[in-house]
Image (cartoon, helix red, strand yellow):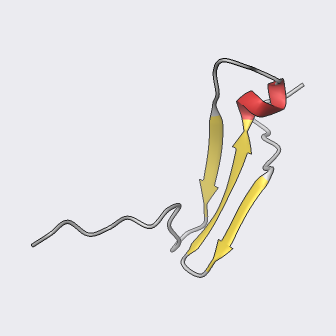
Amino acid sequence: MCNIFEPVFDQQRDEPGFVARRARIGWQLGTERIGASVGGVLPGQAGYPVPLPPR
């Protein structure tokens, strides 16, 4: 059984500057119509590239 307090991280991203991990809780539980994820980002890293707003 999946536990959000002790997630099983099943996806890793190891690009320079974007080191993160994700546990697809909904997928691990076998849900079909709803999804949920728990993520973790290391200090100094970003989860996703965020474009800067235009000046």
Please indicate whether residue 3 sits to the left or right of residue 19 in the image: right
Q: Residue 25 location in percent, x, y?
A: 73, 33
Q: Position of residue 43 (x, y in %)?
A: 55, 69
Residue 15, horizontal then vertical, whole percent = 63, 77
Q: Quadrant of residue 49?
A: bottom left
Quadrant of the drawing holding the N terminus: top right
- 50, above or below 30, in the image: below
Q: Residue at x 60, y 66 (%)?
A: 42
Q: Depth check: give the residue in front, 34 or 2.
A: 34
Residue 50, x across and y down, in percent: 37, 64
21 relative position to 45: left or right: right
Q: Residue at x 63, y 48 (%)?
A: 39
Q: Residue at x 75, y 55 (%)?
A: 11
View extreme (right): residue: 1
- In the rendered view, does 55 fall on the left or right side of 2? left
User: Does residue 21 lie above or below 13 as drawn?
Assistant: above
How many numbered marks, from 0 up?
A: 0
Tell me where residue 21 sits by quadrant.
bottom right
Inspect this view and state whether residue 22 appears: yes
Image quadrant where one finds the C terminus: bottom left
- Is residue 4 visible in this depiction of the protein? no
Tell which residue pokes out farthest to the front in this image: 32
